[in-house]
Amino acid sequence: MNHTHASSETDNFRLLIVAMYAASFIAFGFVVDSPEKIVRGLIEILTTRDALLTDYIGVGGVGAAFVSAGLLTLCSSLVYYLSGAKISGASVACLFLVLGFGLFGKNLLNVWFIVIGVLLYARFKGEPFSTHINTAFFGAALAPIFSEILFSTSLTPPVSLPLAVAVALLLGFVLPPAASQLFKAHMGFSLYNMGFTAGIVGTLIVALFKSYGYVPDPVMVWARGNNVMLGVFSLAVFSSMIALGFYLNPFVLPKMKGLMALPGQSPTDFIALAGFDVTLVNMGLTGLIGTAYVLIVGSDLNGPTIGAILTIVGFAAFGKHPRNILPIMVGVFVGSLGKPWAISDPSIVLAALFGTTLAPIAGRFGWHWGIVAGFVHSSAALSVGQVHAGLNLYNNGFAAGIVAAVLVPVIMAFQPKQDQDDKTARPTPALSPD
């Protein structure tokens, strides 16, 4: 009984930290824009199409985008609290993903029926919703389908609204079993399993759309000119994570070294293995690396890039650390050099940031294979978006799932048999709490 109470308090503390960062987004939004402009911007965000690439900063302004993302994450945190879910590394990753994609693609309107669909699946299976809650919020990758049906068809609202609701509920219902099965294809070497799943499901949905004569129009909204303001905010947020980690435990550095020795193959819960203090330091460091990359290559800090950086930060609780993400980023950078796109182009920058989903390949097989994975991903990520028409927000997760499913068996073919068994089946050791 005491253990359960202590565990609950620990979960509540972690959830509180996430909620505080969500609240900081709201506060930042009201600092940079007036309430009137934020309200107008929120209406624009809620009623726009959300297919890739729709930067909410470009749609409703900086203030509205950050307030929208913060509110969505606070609401999601409340759902986690009410469900009694354990706040593990996967949960932290999921909530920061909600915060990041709250800047481009997910909003207070389009995510909930997918979440309810997963809830209905849990009820159908006779299982608590808390066991599927991460799938529910990860599954909001397909939220643009709801908006696409509701706002961009010639259907009248009496038809489009119930159709959008029904499709979103169905998507939520099928995602849990599909994700469980498709995980086997990449064996946890791509951390964004739901991106892979949503890509396949989204491809089927778009095929259905096209078979009835509806082809979703491409979207490209990419805000520019906010690097100083958003750079200062990002620096403050990620530095505070490092400071908080050291505040909770001044002696985190030895454990940080141990964390970076972990390969990160999913599922690897850094909070359970190393502690929340060390994980916070890791989150802050990876956030600074992601921000630095965007600025060094001369790209833009905006909704999509900050969303991608926050995805790295979230998964720094569940598989990513500086040692295994850098080879992937280098690989994408090298791969972009021979292409007809600049390294600062949106798709290339996002491939470098989101492509860190392949970090376990570098962690398990070495930095050189990480560079190869990033190199291949730099091409795959630019091609697969056409098949789901941008209605899967985790386009890079879809591409990376394909890359991992093909590349990992090839890598293993070069490994000695015993080494293969070790790399795919060896349990991840817990780090010493000392």
Image: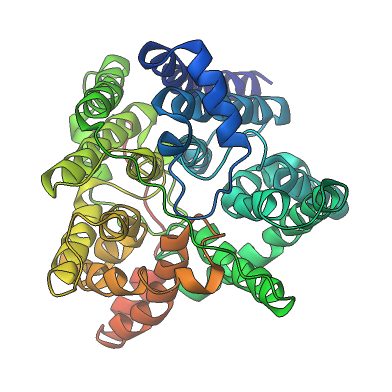
* Image location of residue 414, percent across then percent down: 25, 86
Give the image quarter of residue 373.
bottom left
At x 52%, y 45%, the residue is 105
At x 55%, y 68%, the residue is 388
Give the image quarter of residue 200.
bottom right
* Image location of residue 132, percent across then percent down: 68, 47
* Image location of residue 230, percent across then percent down: 27, 28
Q: Is residue 154 left or right of residue 334?
A: right
Q: Is residue 270 left or right of residue 13?
A: left
Compare residues 242 and 287 and report the one nearer the observer.
287
Q: Is residue 429 above or below residue 270?
A: below
Q: Is residue 389 left or right of residue 245?
A: right
Q: Is residue 181 above or below residue 162?
A: below
At x 32%, y 82%, the residue is 412
Give the image quarter of residue 427.
bottom left
- The quadrant of the image that shows the N terminus is top right
Say whether residue 260 is visible: yes
**For the view shown, which residue lies furthest in the bottom direction?**
413
At x 78%, y 42%, the residue is 128
Compare residues 14 and 401 and report the one nearer the observer.
401
